[in-house]
Image: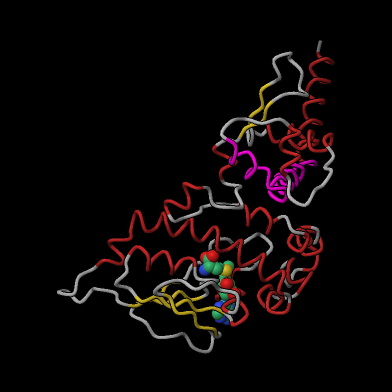
Amino acid sequence: MASLVESEASLREQAQIWKYLFGFADSMALKCAVELRIPDILHSHPEPITLAQIAAAIPDAPSPDLSYLFRIMRLLVVRRIFTFQRAPDGSEGGGLYGPTNLSRWLLREPTPSDRHHGHHLTLAPMVLQENHPWFLDSWHLLSQTVREGGDCPFEKAYGEMFAFAGKNPEFNKILNEGMACTAKITIRTILSHYGDGLFRGGDDDGSLIRSIVDVGGGTGSVVSEIVKAYPHIRGINFDRPHVIKTAPEYPGVTHVGGDMFQEVPPADAVFTKASTFPAQYRLHTLFA
Ligand SMILES: C[S@@+](CC[C@H](N)C(=O)[O-])C[C@H]1O[C@@H](n2cnc3c(N)ncnc32)[C@H](O)[C@@H]1O
């Protein structure tokens, strides 16, 4: 009996190690679904659909492989990203897949309801950013970084992150889109809880903020949300020139390119926020 308990325990321990050693599979399956736009496909159908219907709707894939797609879908159903119901005859083959509240966060395109409400909150760009080989390369340098110290893993791989972005337009786009999607989510929460206290103010006590500069504001998603909610505020989005070059126009927002260690545009209030600092990036690189 003792040896059975022991062997059961040993199997459980091994299972745990297997779970961790394949930990990357979940993020890779998420990335695959986002790249193939499967959440968008499922959310655009009023009813659950078959694997063949999903495959037929995948962009730029004239003959997608159903058996591979099936495996990805099965994992994501187990992870509750999608729903699945078997076909009436009990087979998996003709079963139906549907979206969930989780897959809403993986949409690449705004839904009609997003368009109606004028916002599109999604984590899809962050899934693509964090799982891009450029970012994953850093994770392979953890042991080297512990051994050597010095530069953080990303810097060991590619040099200072924002300088690398300045030289590489594709990396710049992936980074800026990832930052912007999370920044938008965070600022909406900040505004709903603290917006009036921070930004409404009153002329009589001199507390009315009429202009605000977001330092390191990326492509301007944060300051645009502030100005949208408090239109009396003039917004300035300040970031490095290569970021500003790709920033979309927002009503009430002026984009300014520069280096915050040299000079920051004047305004009544200064805002700065880092939505994420992945383990491989050193905070003090930015704020030293
Ligand atoms: C981690 S991102 C944060 C972006 C955004 N504030 C957010 O919360 O998503 C840091 C931003 O600071 C910008 N940045 C880095 N060094 C800068 C500098 N010297 N001057 C101006 N902006 C800088 C980067 O280009 C990047 O957009």
Residue 76 position (above or below residue 248): above
| Residue 25 position within the rendered picture, expressed as x and y whole percent measured from the top left | 77, 42
Which residue is found at the position 84% from the left and 20% from the top?
A: 7
Left or right, 167 with reference to 6: left
In terms of depth relative to the viewer, which is nearer, 72 or 193? 72
Residue 31 position (above or below residue 177): above
In terms of depth relative to the viewer, which is nearer, 277 or 37? 37
The overriding secondary structure of the stretch rendered in magenta is helix
Q: Is residue 143 located in the magenta-colored stretch of the structure?
A: no
Ligand 1 found in image quarter = bottom right
- Count of marks placed on residues: 0
Q: Is residue 25 located in the magenta-colored stretch of the structure?
A: yes
Left or right, 74 with reference to 216: right
Protein image colouring: secondary structure
Residue 101 visible in the displayed image? yes
| Residue 158 position within the rendered picture, expressed as x and y whole percent measured from the top left | 77, 72
Looking at the image, which residue sits at the far left?
204
User: What segment carries the magenta color?
Assistant: 21-45
Left or right, 104 with reference to 167: left
Residue 288 visible in the displayed image? no
The quadrant in which residue 87 appears is: top right
Q: Which quadrant is the C terminus positioned in?
A: bottom right
In terms of depth relative to the viewer, which is nearer, 128 or 56? 56
Residue 18 position (above or below residue 8): below
| Residue 266 position within the rendered picture, expressed as x and y whole percent measured from the top left | 39, 85
Q: Which quadrant is the N terminus positioned in?
A: top right
| Residue 286 position within the rendered picture, expressed as x and y whole percent measured from the top left | 58, 75
Left or right, 167 with reference to 207: right
In terms of depth relative to the viewer, which is nearer, 257 or 134? 257
Looking at the image, which residue sits at the far top?
1
Residue 202 position (above or below residue 49): below
